[in-house]
Amino acid sequence: MTATQLVPPATETGDAGTRIASAEVLVTSPGRNFVTLRLRTEDGVVGLGDATVNGRELAVASYLADHVTPLLIGRDAHAIEDTWQYLYRGAYWRRGPITMAAIAAVDTALWDIKAKLAGLPLYQLLGGRSRRGCLAYGHASGADLPELFDSVRAHLEQGYRAIRIQTGIPGLGSVYGVASSAHAGVGGGTRYDHEPARRSDVPVEEEWDTRAYLRHAPRVFEAVRAEFGPDLPLLHDAHHRLTPIQAARLGKSLEPYDLFWLEDVTPAENPAVLRRVREHTTTPLAIGEVFNTIWDYRELFEEQLIDYVRSPVTHAGGITALRRIFDYAAVYQIKSGVHGPTDVSPVGLAAALHLGIALPNFGIQEYMKHSAETDEVFRPTHRFEDGLLHPGEQPGLGVEYDDEVADAHPYARAYLPVNRLSLDGAMHDW
Ligand SMILES: O=C(O)[C@@H](O)[C@H](O)[C@H](O)CO
Ligand SMILES: [Mg+2]
């Protein structure tokens, strides 16, 4: 018996017409860079997957085009789990953001195809609808309190029912997450909270002072609660900048302001340090936007060190893998809080919404609205209404890639910022 005879033939699991006939890696830059995988079956059914890794886009494009797409031709598009295992175990070199984004793109595209073949929106294949819509949170920010309050008001007017709060810090120039920061946005002009990656040959350098931040943050939340009352769910992102004991102090100092979550208080490499944070504070914790496998969460779940899982479909190996992470999280009453910056493409966001609407332990979905230019390329059918995101009722993911519009936006190198301490210019976590 030859090795190939061990592989279940396509005809056993579906029609010969469901074999993958073409696999294309598409790179476009409608305001920011996106990498998309497009699979097509012999019968012409198309599936899309997001493979965008912000600031390192071409590495995934090459991983897919040079090493993965040749393996996909002729495989049965229905065999999602087998293809996932084939790419994960078969690479030998496991985990890592580039590998897992590539696998995620294949997995997402195959789910898109399966749902289109079934004639159903993808969430129907993931267990069906569990809720009316996915609660979203938006990003409010300001260099100072008046600017922040205006931004919160603008979000409330748009219907947001949960809001992330980031502000400038007195004495510091440009800091993470603030729309009006000096070096903000694409080309330096547009809103920072819309797109932190900047088209340039070198990254923008931001400034950081942990002592100033720890003093300022509780004052900001005190002022926001005084202005907007006790009801509004508020979130905050510390972007991996603190030591465990600093993080513990921040969590404790924010307890009176009843945060929905405090995100990424410590760097991701050693999540076990969250034990120290947890000992000291009841402020809910979220982490995981830079994790990429279920194994990264093991201690955090089993010791109940976090409350929300930040992994998106795009960076955690796709719908198959993220669903497993959430099922594991549910054992410990930990909920989803899927990462949704603009670098997760409309394909990645659609995948999150189909999963989110079906998931029993959905928590919240981050929502940074994509630009009009981006939506012209991807034509998403999901929508934001009354603070909730809806995946829509189109068969599959409900996203369509417009080649003509995409081709008018060629790749442009862009980097996320880097961060230096104001004290002595040493590199710090961004
Ligand atoms: O929570 C968030 O959305 C941020 O941490 C972004 O992931 C980061 O700015 C890179 O896009
Ligand atoms: Mg974050």
Image: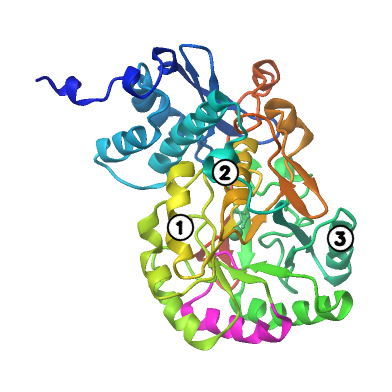
Q: CA distance from mark 1 to mark 3?
A: 32 Å
The x and y percentages for residue 370 are: 72, 40
Label whose residue precedes the other's in the sequence (1 or 3): 3
Q: Amino acid at mark 3?
A: Leu
Circles 2 and 1 in contact, beta carbons < 8 Å: no
- Element type where label 1 sits in the image: helix
Q: CA distance from mark 3 to mark 2?
A: 36 Å
**Disc assigned to residue 202:** 2
Label whose residue precedes the other's in the sequence (3 or 2): 3
The x and y percentages for residue 23 are: 45, 19
The x and y percentages for residue 151 are: 85, 60
Q: Identify the residue under disc 3.
A: 156
Q: Nearer the viewer, mark 3 or mark 2?
A: 3
The structure residue drawn at horizontal position 44% and vertical position 32%, both measured from the top left corner, is: 106
**Relative to residue 184, is residue 328 depicted above or below?**
below
Q: Is residue 414 visible?
A: no
* Numbered range of the magenta stretch: 238-258
Q: How many marks?
A: 3
From the viewer's perspective, tell me whether residue 332 is left or right of residue 157: left
